[in-house]
Image (cartoon, helix red, strand yellow):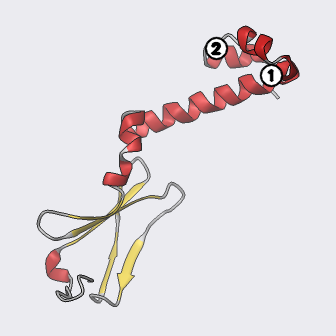
Amino acid sequence: MADRSQHEELTELPDLSGFLREDPYLAPYQEDLCRRYQLFTERLSKLQEAEGSFDAFTRSYMSYGVQRQADNSLMFREWAPGAQALFLTGDFSKYTHGCTRTHTHTHTFLIASACMHIHTLTGQF
């Protein structure tokens, strides 16, 4: 485990003295608390870099997954950092297509409305 001085170089750590006075049983875990705080700030920084802000991340459900567009096409957007490629296939339209990958590990597919057979009675495609 890295010592506290290494953590302080990377991230300004909060003062834990008041926290540890309130709960002295946590004092033996001070180093671990600092390490976890460091990991948290690193993850938060990467998230903010990729999404623009934490608030934008919390609204990602509005753009990820399947989203129907104004022209009735479907946009599929998935976050898959370890994937080299993603493919969407289906017998619903005899459609097979690779995705477009962005630098933030986001993969997108756009299926034009002309490629889909829409069942008007059931609302399914």
The secondary element bearing badge 2 is classed as loop
Marks 2 and 1, how far apart at CA: 12 Å
**How many discs appear?**
2
Q: Is residue 101 shown above or below 110?
A: above
Dot 2 and dot 1 residues touching (CB under 8 Å)? no
Res 90 seen here: yes
Q: Which label was assigned to residue 14? A: 2
Q: Is residue 16 shown above or below 63?
A: above
Residue 13 lies in what quarter of the image? top right
Residue 70 lies in what quarter of the image? bottom left
**Pointer 2 or 1: first along the chain:** 2
Q: Is residue 105 shown above or below 28?
A: below
Percent x, y for residue 82? 54, 58
Q: Is residue 19 left or right of residue 104?
A: right
Percent x, y for residue 116? 21, 83
Q: Residue at x 65, y 32 (%)?
A: 39
Location of mark 1 (residue): 31
Percent x, y for residue 21? 79, 10
